[in-house]
Image (cartoon, grey):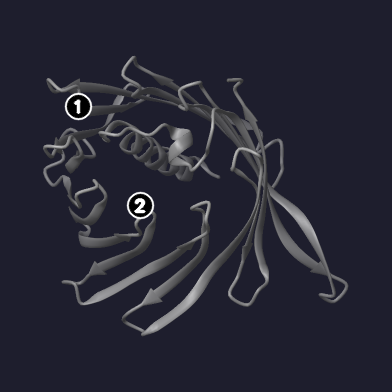
């Protein structure tokens, strides 16, 4: 991963990381947002791809990447590391710090590639309303302005509007509007930006699982999206992609799981539509003592 890609990925992760942790009335921890159950302390994930040797007759598993995450007792992510292609000379790590409200105020990203080490410091500052909700957020990269975000909420305390500025002189900010159902689920989002407008529709089952997302563009004349199916543990077992322009629909992936005693999956196998294996992910999960 080169420096430019790392910068873009880190900015995206930092923004999404905060949006999923600071702007919710029923605030989920990072562990809960990732579907983890119980007092999770750490998760080690190894990714494998399936290859075939001897003229495609014998399948073998080849390690492709590795991730390690550590959470505090509140379920907040405090450390993560990933290694690509299992090369110890090609890794990325991040450290996170929080204020007493549980909002991320600092993220340190470091990477090592081609014999060179890089590091970036992300920082966030916040302004709150009388209810303790964030109404303004400022992001900085190595001390330089990197973004401003303004939030609005409904009477239930759920965010319904986010306006973001990419620099201090940004005259065309990105605006996102969210429509929610009576359970607080986002059922429609509208995004207005320099690159064009986009509208997304979401549908859920009675357990709150997302079962459909549909993306509209070009004045709502073209849409693509996905359908999702779940098992009894509320984990996705099938993702179906559809394209209304080409009138096509196909199974993007199917998933099978193996679980531990806490109900967290410790092995997931991803299958393509033809039944071949896309990925195998194995996890080792450690828990805080009750």
Q: In the visual, does 253 lie left or right of 225? A: right
Instruction: Decide: few, some or many residues near mark 2? Use Cα within 10 Å; few <14, some 14-19, many ≥20.
Output: few
| Image position, residue 113 (x, y; %) | 62, 37
Question: Residue 69's mark?
Answer: none
How far is the residue under mark 2 from the one under mark 1?
24 Å
Instruction: Decide: few, some or many residues near mark 1? Use Cα within 10 Å; few <14, some 14-19, many ≥20.
Output: many
The quadrant where residue 143 appears: top left
The quadrant where residue 242 appears: bottom left
Q: Of helix, strand and loop, which one carries label 1? A: loop
Question: What residue is shown with label 2?
Answer: 208
Image quadrant in which the C terminus is located: top right
Question: What residue is shown with label 1?
Answer: 133
Residue farthest along the right direction in this orientation = 54
Considering only vertical position in the picture, is 218 above or below 162? below
Q: Nearer the viewer, residue 42 or 50?
A: 42
Q: Nearer the viewer, residue 9 or 49?
A: 49
| Image position, residue 214 (x, y; %) | 30, 66
Q: Residue at position x 35%, y 59% from top?
A: 205
Q: Residue at position x 44%, y 64% from top?
A: 228
| Image position, residue 84 (x, y; %) | 64, 45
Q: In the visual, does 8 lie left or right of 193? A: right
Considering only vertical position in the picture, is 18 above or below 257? above
| Image position, residue 284 (x, y; %) | 68, 37
Q: Residue at position x 53%, y 37% from top?
A: 37
Considering only vertical position in the picture, is 176 above or below 79? below
Q: Residue at position x 29%, y 28% from top?
A: 139
């Amino acid at each position: 991963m080169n420096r430019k890609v790392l910068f873009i990925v880190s900015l995206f992760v930092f923004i999404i990381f905060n949006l999923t942790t600071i702007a919710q009335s029923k605030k989920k921890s990072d562990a809960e947002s990732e579907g983890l159950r119980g007092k999770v302390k750490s998760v080690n994930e190894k990714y494998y791809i399936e290859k075939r040797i001897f003229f495609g007759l014998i399948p073998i598993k080849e390690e492709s990447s590795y991730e390690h995450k550590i959470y505090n007792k509140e379920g907040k992510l405090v450390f993560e590391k990933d290694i690509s292609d299992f090369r110890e000379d090609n890794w990325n790590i991040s450290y996170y710090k929080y204020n007493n409200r549980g909002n991320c105020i600092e993220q340190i990203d470091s990477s090592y590639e081609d014999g060179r080490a890089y590091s970036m410091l992300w920082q966030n500052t916040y302004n709150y309303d009388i209810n303790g909700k964030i109404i303004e957020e400022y992001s900085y990269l190595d001390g330089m302005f990197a973004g401003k975000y303004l939030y609005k909420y409904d009477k239930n305390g759920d965010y319904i509007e986010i306006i973001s500025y990419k620099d201090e002189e940004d005259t065309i900010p990105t605006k996102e509007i969210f429509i929610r159902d009576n359970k607080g689920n986002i059922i429609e989002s509208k995004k207005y930006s320099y690159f064009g407008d986009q509208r997304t529709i979401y549908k859920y089952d009675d357990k709150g699982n997302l079962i459909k997302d549909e993306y509209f563009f070009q004045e709502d004349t073209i849409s693509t999206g996905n359908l999702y199916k779940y098992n009894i543990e509320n984990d996705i077992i099938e993702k179906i992609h559809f394209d209304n322009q080409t009138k096509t629909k196909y199974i993007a992936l199917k998933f099978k799981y193996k679980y531990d005693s806490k109900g967290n999956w410790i092995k997931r196998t991803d299958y393509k539509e033809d039944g071949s294996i896309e990925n195998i992910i194995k996890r080792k999960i450690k828990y805080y003592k009750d």
